[in-house]
Image (cartoon, grey):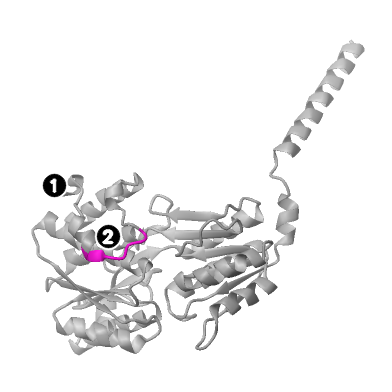
Amino acid sequence: MEKQNLILLIGLTIVLFIAIIFLIKSLPEEVGEKYEGIKSITMVTDMGGLGDRSFNDAGWNGVQIASEGFGLKANVIQKMEGQDLTANVSQAAETSDIVVGMGFMLKDAIITNAPLYPDTYFILIDEDAGDLPNVASYLFHSDQSGYLAGIIAASVSETGKIGIVKGMDVPSVLTYSAGFRAGAKTWNEFSGDKVEVLTKTADTFTDPSKGRQLTKLLIDQGVDIVFDIAGATGIGVYEAVQESNRAQGITEQDIRTGIAKPKYFAVGVDVDHDEMYYGEVLVSALKKMSETIYSAVEDITKNRFIGGVHLIDFKDGFTGISDMKYTKQYVPETALSLIERAEELMMERDERLLVPLDITNVEEYLDGFKTPKELLEIID
């Protein structure tokens, strides 16, 4: 009996030993070593810099969250007048293990620097740096966010005119714009309305006064809802909307207490602006860069980094619209049903609701855009 127990004990010991060996071999290689080697992260902004309340601020928020989550020292280098972006990226790579570049202006600077710093990880947001092994580029299908926001804006407009203020005509902006205008087109086909979309381009991402001026021009032309796709220039969009509401005698207190509905609304971009301008942001078209940067840094620290292009979309959970916590009561139920069905198609990655991410001609895209028949068959 004792001999049998001894044999059983030896057998269990061998099984346990084999299991431990298997577990060790199944762990990702160099996880601990790789994590210990990652000490710092630096973000390089585009020309808008911090304080734009959208693109760069969202990126910096993601860097800070990743810094806290993984114990990294975080730094930011802002693009200032006369500064060279290639030099900024080089400075970041000299002092950091991870460099985050924000936007299309950083593309060439990262392509130049990445081969010179092969042990540094580069994360490029909203652009494609190609197949460099130490660069992960993240491109967002922000057209999906714009599309949903366009449906909402068109359904709520009382003047039959909605507007867009663009910073510059670059693909990341045009993608948003094409989606928004396609959303308005879908609402028109669905409802029989004839909502127009007017656009203005500031040719800058750094001039709030220009954004305010262009928004006022749109409002003078009968627009009552304006989509901001303009970086720091877009700050002026919200200012103009608030000023126009005040000129109508509609105070912030009136809006907060429900005494009055705003006559004019803004549509937020990139981040949830609903909290920033209570009740005067109808909806925000989201591009979840903070979450994307955190996820990218986590991949680096856990030795899961993969260079090349990563496409981000609604199914990934990184595009979409805000909850409209203060404005949903203004949106027709039919529009909400339309949004729900459109989101189902986006979850399926339906190509009919995807704008080419290298788009250069929005008018050409809209001419060829066909609303999926499933959306037009929704019954109130």
Q: Position of residue 191 (x, y in %)?
A: 11, 57
| Mark 1: amino acid | Ile
Considering the image in quadrants, where does the N terminus appear? top right
Could you say which is closer to the camera, residue 91 or residue 305? 91
Seen as rendered, the residue at the extreme top is 1
Residue shown at 57% from the left, 55% from the top? 307
Residue shown at 32% from the left, 62% from the top? 359
In the rendered image, which residue does mark 1 sit on?
379
Q: Position of residue 174 (x, y in %)?
A: 31, 67
Q: Are marks 1 and 2 in contact (CB under 8 Å)?
A: no
Q: Which dot, 1 or 2, sits closer to the camera?
A: 2
Left or right of 85? Residue 167 is: left
Q: Position of residue 296 (x, y in %)?
A: 56, 58
Residue shown at 22% from the left, 67% from the top? 153
| Local SS, label 2 | helix
Q: In which quarter of the image is residue 233?
A: bottom left
The disc placed on residue 147 is 2
Q: Give the range drawn in magenta.
A: 357-363
Seen as rendered, the residue at the extreme right is 3
